Image (tube, rainbow, N blue to C red):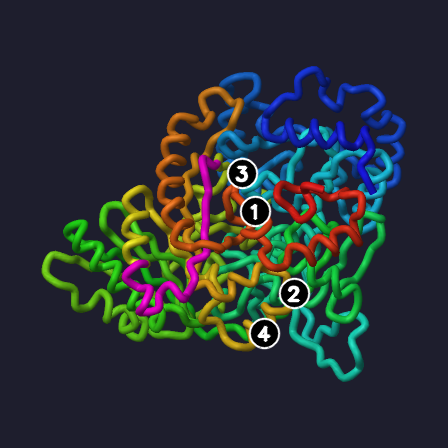
Amino acid sequence: MPLSRRRLLKDTLSGALAIGATVPGLPAFADSGSDWPSQAAWDGLRDQVGGRLIKVTSPLEPCMRGSTPACSARLAEMKNPFFIQSQPGGLQTNGWLDAWRGEISPYAVAAETVEDIVAAVNFARETGVRLAIKGAGHDYLGRNCAANSLLVWTHPMRAVAYHEAFKPAGAPADVDGLPAVSAQAGARWLDVYQIASANNRYCQGGGCTSVGAAGGFLQGGGYGSFSKRYGSGAGSVLEYEVVTAAGRVLTANAFQNEDLFWALRGGGGGTFGIVSRVTLRAHEQPDTMGIARGTIKAPSDAAFRELLARFVAFYPQALNTPDWGEQIAIRPDNAIELFMVYLDQSEAEARAVWTPLAGALPTGYSADLDFLTRPFQGFWDPDSWKTIEPDIVTRDMRPDAEPGTYWWTTNQGEVAEFIDTYQSRWLPLAMFDPANADALAQTLFDASRHAALRLQINKGLAGAPADVIAREEETSINPLVREAAGIIILASRQAPAFPGIAGHEPDPAKGRAAAAKISAAMAILRAATPGGGTYGNEADYFEPDWKASFYGAHYDRLLAVKRKYDPDNLFRVHHGVGSDM
């Protein structure tokens, strides 16, 4: 069904304003008379949702009046990701250079029930108001905010529950129940991890504790530190409760609404409906986990090229396994820096894995590696880190903070960030084959002359167990991830940085200089991986050929599901399925 002129006007304005542009000759939508719902209409929506329609203001409002003690206090609070997500107008990412900036919806439905979500969806469909959907507020591509929109703010929906034997609705009698955790739309991964751990289980989610468990992370695929063992988050989903564009509440699983279930497991968030609850498989918990950190440095460019050749030969057997995760940086200063995690190995066993690469280096090289193994139980309890590694966590010290709330200190640079650029590319395992190894080493070397490369091995599923791959084949994630040894990420950010707040704004010149170097490195990687793809949640806003890159062979099927459940394109996000309809 074609969009009306009124809807087209609103889409044009909302899309332009979301990236800070203007449309010559057209007024802002909120001021355009009949194009904006009447106050009586808004009052009616407020009554429908029990008063939970709220006006939204920027959490930075105290700083819009200049440098004051109130502004200083607020800027300090903005270093806390849990504070940011407690604000309906808060975003973990404040914008992207020359792409988008954070926008504040005039109104939000602070949803506490699925009926609140239904009311918001019906209102948007009937009035033509743009919808924005936000839970925890983690999003790189600006998909969870839009100017002149109605925000569906699911953060208040935080309930989580453990099931010893969960059976999806409609499952035949002979289907066994599985250990599982259900989480409402506003729950964070920390909430899910802690209830799973209390039952000696683990759910596969994101590494960052404050990321939402049911939103775009999961619907876009979702990878965490241990995905080489457990797969993507999408691969562990057993059931969704979802509100469609028609305002219907559907249960989607392997036994009913199967096409929607498939699409929601990898086809992207904010596209097919609003998920109000997800239920995830709870896996058997590992016995131990460990952290491996350190640097291997070469004395010259030629020696670094040789080190990379050794690394390429080392990687497939040593690290492309269910036991290892996280990242290896390949730096312009001729060093390989690792921050890795490993499962069910002693420190001696983990060190022995690295001995072939770091244990017998020629003269002039240096290697300084450190290994720490701890029980997996208690991994999500900040108190358990006090005597092991106290600086690895940052506690939420607000007086009203929930007990046990923390974030990893290494994630601090992402809090209130402004992105200069963020580019990524899956690295196929086939490139590590002996016939291709020399070319791969040269590619990595050449790209590293421009910028540091981060190879995140847990965001490629080659090397995962057969049962995990079988589950992944049932998802709508780009199939290329199953052939990937990992993903290479090149990124530059400024944090904390707040566009429009004098003295705290990002530096565009600095950002463009960093982006230029990263783009030069990525051009080399793209040339070496023709027909490749990437993880759509962590990718370039300007990704070329985004349909093939993000969705691959699944795009046409995903588009058919989109047209079935959202024929008028009510749910639209940047580079989402059907966003160009």
Q: Determine whether 493 is above or below 67 in the image.
A: below
Q: Is residue 488 left or right of residue 253?
A: left
- Picture coordinates of residue 265 (x, y %)? 65, 60
Q: Nearer the viewer, mark 4 or mark 1?
A: 1
Q: Is residue 435 magenta?
A: yes
Residue 126 position within the rendered picture, expressed as x and y whole percent measured from the top left: 87, 37
**Mark number for residue 470?**
4
Label placed on residue 93:
3
Q: Residues within 10 Å of mark 4 (few under 14, many from 20)?
A: few
> In the image, which disc is placed on residue 237?
2
- Position of the C terminus, as image quadrant, is top right
Q: Is residue 567 visible?
A: yes
Return the residue nearer the eye: 376 or 383: 376
Between the residue at mark 1 and the residue at mark 2, the CA separation in whole angstroms equals 25 Å
Task: Identify the residue at image location x=84%, y=41%.
Answer: 49
The amino acid sitting under disc 4 is Ala
> Which residue in the rendered view is the most extreme toward the bottom?
174
Q: Amino acid at mark 3?
A: Thr
Q: The disc labelled 2 sits on which kind of residue? A: Val
Q: In the figure, is residue 320 to the left or right of 207?
A: left
The disc, 4 or 1, on the residue closer to the chain's N-terminal end is: 4
Q: Nearer the viewer, mark 3 or mark 4?
A: 4
Going from N to C along the chain, the mark reached first, 1 or 3, is: 3
**Which numbered dot is residue 546?**
1
Q: Secondary structure at mark 2?
A: strand
